[in-house]
Image: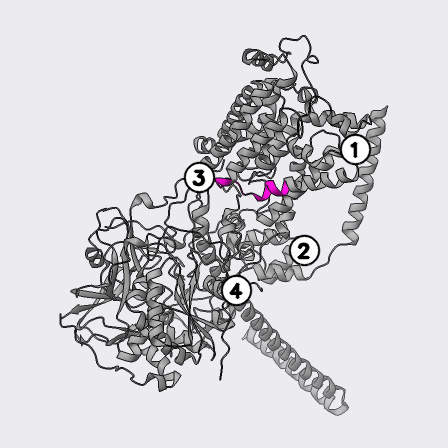
Amino acid sequence: MEGITAILALGILAALLGLVLGLAARSIRVESDKVEEQIDALLPQTQCAQCGYPGCRPYAKAIAEGEADINLCAPGGDAAIRALADLLGREVKPMAHDVDPEESAVVAVVDEPRCIGCTLCIQACPVDAIVGAPRQMHTVIAAECTGCKLCLPPCPVDCIDLAPLPPADNGSAWARPDARTATA
Amino acid sequence: MNPTRIAVTPGRFHGGLKLDGHRKLASGKPITPLPLSERYFLWLAQHYGDAALPCVSVGERVLRGQVVALQEGQRGTPIHAPTSGIVRGFQDLPAPAADSSSASMLVIESDGEDRACTDLSGLAEWDCAAPETLVERIAQSGIVGLGGAVFATAAKIARAEAGVTLILNGAECEPYISCDDGLMRERANSIIGGAQILLRALGSSDCIIAIERDKPEAIAAMEVALRDAGDERFRLERIFSLYPAGGERQLIETLTGRQVPRGGLPQDIGLVCINVGTAAAIRHAVCEGRPLTSRVTTVTGPVLGAPGNFDVRIGTPVRELIAAAGGCNDPKARLIMGGPMMGIPLRDDRVPVIKAMNCLLALPESALADGRDQRPCIRCGECAEVCPARLLPQQMYWELRDERFEPARKFGLDACIECGCCDVVCPSHLPLTRYFRWGKGQLHRQTVERERAEHARQRFEARNARIGQQKAQREARLAAKREALEKARSDGNRGAAIDEIIARKKSSTAGNDDSGQTG
Amino acid sequence: MSVAATAAPFLRPPAGVTQVMARVLLALCPATLAHIWYFGPGIAINMAIAASACIGSEALILRLRQRPIGASLGDLSAVVTGVLLAFCIPPLTPWWITACGSVFAIVFAKQLYGGLGFNPFNPAMAGYAVILISFPVEMTRWLAPRQLTETMPGFPASLAAILSGKPPGAPTWDGMTMATPLDFAKTEIARLQTMPEIRADVMFGDFAGLGWEWIANWIAIGGIWMIYKGVIRWHIPVAMLASLSLCAFVFWIADPGKFASPGFHVFGGAAMLGAFFIATDPVSAATTIRGRVIYAAGIGVLTYVIRTWGGYPDGIAFAVLLMNLCVPLIDRYTRPRIYGDGS
């Protein structure tokens, strides 16, 4: 008999508290547009649409609204996933697509002799990194190129290549030390 | 006219370690010059900043002190030939730098005569010269910070405002190194002379000379020189010997009790810190017209036959220094440029001397940490107790272990001076300083990437704005045209005429279509 | 002379974790010998059982976690946990209780958090708290000190008792057990005796209980040796004992009849052990010195509160565990100001 009283008492208490918490979660919710900005600030801004959204800001919006997962950004890599996980309090997951790490640091290079001056790549580049005009030769400003690869499909003569960026390797003195800890 | 001198409040910095100085090995003997080498190798990227570009051609004859390479820019620092001879081109040698990769070195073959270049002559009346003239001369003589940072001294002076206090750094706190000790013992007059020139160049009249207490002979020699000079502007301060008291920020805190603002420079609080070796070099450059072509280097280590301080020319292969120091009796000894706490390991003994090489240290394997017996961090907190920058190395390590660079930065990773004190006291033998160095590199990389991303985002948004604007303009134009058309239609006669034209156009197009189809 | 490059600093660091742990064990030896002298060799047997159980369970968990066993066991931290746990329990505790506590301490309070360096709670105290609550009768079967009994069990008798759980020599435990001075004082206070009357009982010596105060002395001597050798710093022991004495002093001055003197508290129970050996566990303590002083002071205050008004005669274990919970908060608010961040 006492056992049933105890179970009832605790059960009712738990239900009441749960109700209070649920109502509070709805009424005191912090509506934050700034979350979207904060997410956007963590994305690499290549605007490459590999995540399935037409640009980094739409992807950020989708994450903020809970529609998209945080592991879709290929250029951002694991660092971006980790940063987003930290910001939003979500779990760190492995990258959704298969990303070849060699590919991620590239710049586009126009093979000038083959270029026919059609401006299709200029229109495709999201950051205006290609200069040129109709019937004039086009070229990529390497410093502005983010490696999003959106210019490759439109080119009718397939004259754009991807060149790897030189690796930022400073040698062994700056490398991560071996974690040969005997973690007990 | 009585300038205010800053108060010296003898204090101490936080943390630090009492390390065995091993000074007896190399000090106490006179500074020995090295005989001329056959070839000298000049590493053109040895200055802070961009690599210098050569300004001589292969086969050209050069004299000692002649400019052979120059950094670009207004305050570019030149590199001078260490002796007279012929420029032979470039050779790939391991560079005395953190990544030990090979670099192209300019080769000068000595002709044995060691003739001096007379481009620069001594400024006899430097004490009447304008400060700018002195700064110019310092820049032309290729003078950089000889304490190890090799920052262009002329740029340092130019950045300071008038009336700063000059601090001469004779602390030399790292074990084994004694080149400044020897310099102070034997060439105190040159140091004082150089400091006087600096005071004129800075437009100030307050100089504090800081020497560690464990160098009584050096202190005595400097006191004699000060007495001879009779210059009221100088004060000698004996500071207790604790590593890293010779670090600029720690020295300033010890002498004045003030701290250099984080991310700032000593000039921000009215102080300029110059190494005693640099001061002596300035004296030679201004009074004798001798550019920087040599420096005093300590060659020491328990495996060398006769360690000591040597006067070496820039570009001498390190192999010859070892030979001059009695040879090395351990083939597996490790060569280090600098001291055991902050030095840079050298790949082999073909590396040439550069302006930053204050010490060449040969340590046997047995004296080195091997990094194999790492244990987990037991949170003992000893690292925080010895950190001169008042950081929490333990917390930074925990964050960096998980590659959380931003939280590590919040714990002060950017303020770490990489002195190595935390490594030495860690009972778990963790390579803390290496983690911090790595973390700093990653943070820098992340900052660069974030700036690029922000830049790309702005360009993207600008492009969207432009396209949107073009679209809006087009729509506006179309709307205006449509409006004009509507207005014209509603206006009676004209409207009928337009309708007729439109109808005719329609029918003719239809007719054309028909004829096109049939015919 | 071509050698591979590593990076600065190049000096070989001094002592390692193993040496630290070995010194802790060494510092406990005088107190252990004193304990054996006053209460029989039971504690030594329990230390052996606890240490073996700790090492065994650690090896097992490391195997399950696929981590190298030799290096982890070699740092002696499991042995220290076992030894400290054994020091806190009655000398004739049955072996299964000791083993339970040891296994819980290592498996749950240390290994499941990630091993050495990752545990937020002091493993020895966590293990002790579990067996204290689970086996309340056995954990209060303390023996009478040498001066007050003729039947101190020898080594074979102690071993038999520990292995079997039956009282040595006597048919029941009541004949040979005696409450600790702290326990005695608590029950007598509840029976409205005054402190002077309680202190007059034969079991009390100069400061605290007979035998116990001498053990506390030897613990303090071992602790001071550890400070001298640099194994621990003086801040935690001093802060804890000071705050404990201060609390005791305030109430004792107010009403000496009801509250025990500072000396009684400092030399009684496990206060000395807690101050020098338990609270100083670096892994579960706060990070900075300022944080540690606050942490240790908190332990002192909580110990006094539990001893005087709480349900247990000695509150060191719970005080330590509660302050372990507070460590992240303390760490957050005691960060030093970094060089250059404003003066």
Dot 4: chain letter: B
Amino acid found under the numbered disc labelled 2: Glu
Q: CA distance from mark 2 to mark 4?
A: 53 Å
Amino acid found under the numbered disc labelled 1: Lys
Secondary element type, mark 1: loop
Label 1: which residue?
Answer: C258
Q: CA distance from mark 4 to mark 3?
A: 35 Å
Amino acid found under the numbered disc labelled 3: Gly
Label 4: which residue?
Answer: B257
Dot 1: chain letter: C
At x 44%, y 39%, the residue is: C16
Label 3: which residue?
Answer: C16
Dot 3: chain letter: C
Q: Count residues near mark 1 (Cα–Cα under 10 Å), then give few for <14, some for 14-19, many for 20+.
A: some
Between residues B493 and B217, which one lies in front from this camera angle? Answer: B217
Q: CA distance from mark 1 to mark 3?
A: 48 Å
Q: Which residues are magenta?
A: C228-240
Between residues C228 and A151, which one lies in front from this camera angle? Answer: C228
Amino acid found under the numbered disc labelled 4: Gly
Q: CA distance from mark 4 to mark 1?
A: 52 Å
Q: Are the residues flagged by discs 2 and 1 in contact, CB closer than 8 Å?
A: no
Height in image: B402 above or below B14?
A: above
Residue A64 badge:
none
